[in-house]
């Protein structure tokens, strides 16, 4: 009887359990932490495209900007990812144009992007605002696909045009961007194959790592930092530049304009013709940390217009042709900490001569070393000009350690007559004139 009961149980119940095991469903429903990306209708993916470009053992083989650009554009077309550039020299006849959500990563110490020799020519006829072609007197060297800049004596800086040559008909060149201004022959209108070696417009989610930029300044004309640089960003929001070197560019080393939340870390900018590091034109909340700006023709670190709420920390600004750090037009609420500012030709730190509404207010300089600045003329370690208010100088060391007859940093801190309140706290100053305060006694210092 007992055996019969067991047999009946197997017959009745066993198939039911087997069926349940076979039909049990996997739960594919969204996890609680899964969220769509801000500008996409999907969540973040773990595996993204990675394309290797190089001179051997790569997905895309090449030795110039075309191979690099092909890789970047392919990855951008898939929504973003990483381009890995192998070792070697890459000849740049046009910029490497960055794209949103693409990381460009070189091989540390071995990936060199070298600017090609440039040519220049006067325009033969006026180039009109909005026109997408120019006529040059000498078309030699203006090849289709090359980068090109157009400017005049009057229309330069942001009004210069940097574009690509898309076609040629004798002396007539078509370009991929409209001219930003009237380029008049009477104003010495000029075209040249000048461009940033790495360039990015209207970006987000971009990283640039481990690139060496060789600017070849001896064989290229100068390009102003408002439209150019060894690495140049325009509205490159949130871009990160890490462990890059820019050298010998005929213009600025690293320039980013109208680009909020940019970070530049562990980079070198040296022997460039103009500014070493140039955040500007409303670039707010920048972070520049552990960078070396050395032997550039202009200032080591130039805060241009409306640079606010930035952090500049642990940098070395040395041997530059201008001052080490320049602060001015609406550059407010920045922190400059633990920097070494030394051996710059025209001075250590300069607050430029601005009126009250445009001055660089509420900046903090803390724990900086300011030493041995000035070459031909006597200078101040820190010079505050204009109607600059509420500057804080705290725990800075200001000195000149050169032999007495070679010292040019003869003033520690100079405060000109229109300057507002300044807080001086625990600064160690070794100078012939430690503090020269030219203000009237009524100024409310802390």
Image (cartoon, rainbow, N blue to C red):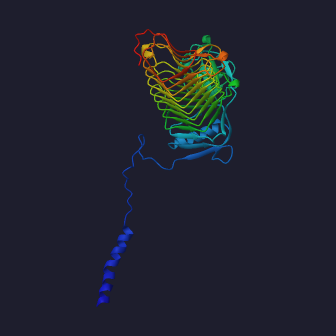
Q: Is residue 377 visible?
A: yes
Q: Is residue 399 above or below residue 185?
A: below
Residue 196 location, quadrant:
top right
Q: Residue 330 placed where, x, y %?
A: 45, 19
Q: Residue 76 placed where, x, y %?
A: 53, 40
Residue 411 location, quadrant:
top right
Which residue appears farthest toward the bottom when viewing the image?
1
Q: Is residue 152 above or below residue 109?
A: above
Q: Quadrant of the N terminus?
A: bottom left
Q: Residue at x 62, y 33 (%)?
A: 245
Q: Residue at x 63, y 27 (%)?
A: 294
Q: Residue 97 placed where, x, y %?
A: 57, 34
Q: Is residue 226 visible?
A: no
Q: Quadrant of the C terminus?
A: top left
Q: Is residue 42 above or below residue 150?
A: below
Q: How many marks?
A: 0
Q: Residue at x 55, y 43 (%)?
A: 82
Which residue appears farthest toward the top when viewing the image?
440
Residue 198 location, quadrant:
top right
Q: Residue 264 placed where, x, y %?
A: 54, 33
């Amino acid at each position: 009887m007992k055996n019969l009961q067991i047999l009946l149980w197997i017959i009745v119940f066993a198939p039911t359990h087997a069926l349940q095991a076979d039909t049990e469903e996997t739960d594919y429903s969204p996890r609680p932490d899964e969220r769509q990306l801000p500008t996409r209708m999907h969540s973040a993916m773990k595996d993204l495209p990675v394309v290797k470009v190089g001179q051997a053992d790569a997905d895309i083989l090449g030795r110039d900007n075309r191979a690099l650009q092909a890789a970047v554009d392919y990855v951008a077309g898939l929504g973003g990812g990483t381009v890995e550039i192998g070792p070697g020299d890459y000849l740049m006849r046009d910029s490497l144009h960055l794209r949103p959500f693409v990381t460009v990563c070189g091989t540390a110490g071995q990936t060199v992007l070298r600017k090609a020799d440039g040519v220049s020519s006067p325009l033969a006829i006026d180039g009109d605002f909005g026109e997408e072609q120019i006529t040059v007197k000498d078309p030699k060297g203006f090849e289709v696909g090359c980068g090109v800049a157009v400017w005049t004596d009057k229309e330069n800086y942001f009004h210069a045009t940097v574009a690509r040559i898309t076609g040629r008909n004798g002396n007539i060149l078509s370009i991929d961007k409209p001219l930003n201004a009237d380029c008049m022959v009477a104003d010495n209108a000029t075209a040249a194959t000048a461009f940033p070696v790495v360039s990015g417009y209207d970006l987000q989610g971009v990283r640039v790592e481990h690139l060496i930029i060789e600017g070849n300044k001896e064989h290229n004309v100068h390009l102003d930092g408002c439209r150019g640089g060894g690495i140049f960003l325009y509205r490159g929001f949130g871009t990160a530049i890490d462990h890059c070197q820019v050298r010998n560019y005929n213009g600025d080393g690293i320039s980013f304009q109208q680009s909020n939340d940019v970070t530049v870390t562990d980079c070198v900018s040296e022997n460039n013709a103009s500014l070493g590091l140039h955040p500007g034109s409303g670039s707010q909340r920048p972070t520049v940390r552990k960078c070396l700006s050395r032997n550039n023709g202009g200032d080591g670190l130039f805060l241009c217009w409306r640079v606010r709420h930035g952090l500049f920390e642990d940098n070395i600004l040395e041997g530059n042709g201008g001052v080490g750090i320049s602060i001015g037009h609406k550059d407010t609420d920045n922190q400059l900490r633990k920097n070494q500012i030394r051996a710059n030709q025209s001075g250590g730190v300069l607050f430029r001569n601005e009126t009250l509404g445009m001055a660089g207010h509420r900046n903090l300089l803390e724990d900086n070393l300011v030493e041995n600045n000035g070459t031909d003329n006597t200078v101040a370690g820190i010079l505050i000009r204009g109607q600059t208010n509420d500057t804080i100088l705290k725990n800075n060391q200001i000195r000149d350690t050169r032999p007495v007859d070679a010292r040019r940093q003869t003033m520690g801190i100079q405060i000109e007559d229109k300057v507002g309140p300044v807080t001086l706290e625990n600064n160690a100053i070794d100078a012939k004139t430690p503090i020269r305060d030219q203000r009237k006694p009524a100024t409310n210092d802390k």
